[in-house]
Amino acid sequence: MRTLVHLDADAFFAAVEQASDSRLRGKPVAVGGEKRGIIASASYEARSFGIYTPMPTRQARRLCPKLIVLPGDFERYEQFSNWMFGYCYDFTPEVEQTSIDEGYFDLSAVPKPPVEIALTIRKAIGQKLKITVSEGIGTNKLVSAVASKLTKPAAFNEVPPGREAAFLHPLPNHWLPGVGPKTSERLNAAGLVRICHVAAIPLEMLELLLGSQAASVRQFARGIDERPLIPAREPQKSFSQQETFATDLTDEEYVNATLRCMADNLFSKVREEGRCIRTLTVKVRYNDMAEDQASESLIEPTDLETDVYGRLHAMLRQAWKRRVSLRLVSLKLSNVYDGRFRSELALEVSAQRQDARGRLALVIDELRRSRGRSVVLRGHDFRLRDAPRETIAAEVTRLTVHNRRSPIANRQWADCYVPLRTHSHYSFLDSTLSPTAIIELARHHGLPSVALTDAGNLHGAVEFVQAARQAGVKPILGAEVRVGDKALLLYVESAQGYNNLCRLLSRHAELAAANDVEASVATQQRFPFRREELDGFTGGLIAVSEDTRLAEMFPRRFYQIAMKQTVQASTTESANPVAACPPIHYATPDDR
């Protein structure tokens, strides 16, 4: 009878960052790419906000404005992984590391009780590495893995011999190996919702649903898993790389150059391992997150990127089925062979040329490793130094012809325009911009000043003012609230105004929370004021609103929001000056 332990680190990348920097402990932390990247790992503090892997970083920041997003440090993660599994090797040589943060170790031949050893390893990792792990103990891989993952984080579960089926049967079918989301839906539609249902169905009926996979799935459902523990990690079975573009692209030449650059990087790794590949896969992701791909197998395996350059463009066109912009492109090399393939005698001229290209590739690899990638550049590398064509055109459009009827679109009027209603990501679910990004945009467009008017809060005030001072942009601090069903923009004119605005927002936040303790942050931020709440707190504040009845509360400090009807009536009916305050939530239309 085997005794296997499945070891699984909890939120590994984020946990390593928290272990390495004590200031991050207890705070929402994620590892991933900024802007158009995704979350690769999220701490459990971050997961409490609904953040998961792989969620777009922009969406994660909306859910948790105070989320700390860090770039990945994979050398550090690899080191922590080696330390973590090093504790397992202290007790047994039978260790299979299935990924950087999880694996199995076999305690069947160890004289000490397995539970005692597992607890010792768990305690050592927690004390020395400052990360938590989950462990499951069972007689096979399936049971031990499910036991470790079932009650994460910091899980510790043992399934006694003979209890495998009883442990698995109440669980949903997606816990079975080989049952992904689509297969799970198929099983659910057939009434096989739980593992016990899959275990009980006749094999011939299960084959109608799962085909050749049915026999192994039913064995797993009965708690039987004869997969061996493999101590040595198998060689890499594929090489892949992907690129998420800063903006959605339609520039086919630029995307093709990106694929060629990926091929350079991947084939360098193939040669470094003394291997060759036969199958190429190009995948594209559209701006609506849908994906298409194209695969092709070469007649002969190769380890030279120059052999596939011509195929990449054709495969890109084949994969790019919809004529819409792309968000991501990836290249995968698979069907890997050991050694270098040669189909011709060395005396053949074509074989000699191929050998010469191989020697040249090795020289380029060595030069790039020792001197940097830019020491040798190909034509596609120079193409990537220029921005995609449609991005350049879009930038010119935004700066010059966004609204031909408006003088603001002409750069000579830029110094006269000040955005007065800009929201940051502290306006929950209402903006993708940080306070610093707002200042950077103002500086980029040559604006003399910009206002921050977040919904019902001043959380971004300090960051906003500090960034403005560094950039030489005049900050205008304010907030947007609602009085009844009308928006009211309040701007700080003096120290008195700042104090009054702080008091108004603080008192109102308490009222909003007391009114509905279950309300979301976004709802509480937009909870309407009663007019009497403003009494005594309007001094030093400039007000802008559609509701002209508020003008008497802000003598000589009230402006009416410019709309079509107010502009037409301003010369005859209204005595209030008019201010243009279009709301700003994004840097570009693509950010929506």
Image (tube, rainbow, N blue to C red):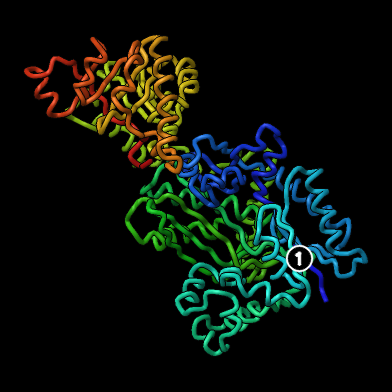
Q: What percent of the width, then of the height, locates residue 349?
A: 60, 64
Quick check: 202 left or right of 382? Answer: right
The answer, for residue 347, to whether it is visible in the render is no
- The residue at which mark 1 appears reads as 158
Q: What percent of the width, then of the height, locates residue 389?
A: 36, 41
- Looking at the rendering, which quadrant does residue 493 occupy? top left
Which of the two residues, 343 or 535, is positioned nearer the viewer here? 535
Which residue is rendered at x = 36% and y = 15% of the image? 537
The amino acid type of the residue labelled 1 equals Glu
| Residue farthest left in this picture | 572
Quick check: 405 left or right of 227? Answer: left
Q: What percent of the width, then of the height, locates residue 298?
A: 54, 68
Task: Please say if 177 is above or below 389.
Answer: below
- Looking at the rendering, which quadrant does residue 559 occupy? top left
| Residue farthest right in this picture | 111
Quick check: 303 left or right of 208? Answer: right
Q: Quadrant of the image for the C terminus? A: top left
Which of the two residues, 540 or 416, is positioned nearer the viewer here? 540
- Dot 1 falls on a residue whose secondary structure is strand
Task: Please say if 80 is above or below 341.
Answer: above
Q: What percent of the width, then of the height, locates residue 463?
A: 49, 23
Which residue is rendered at x = 58% and y = 61% of the image? 333
Q: Quadrant of the image for the N terminus? A: bottom right
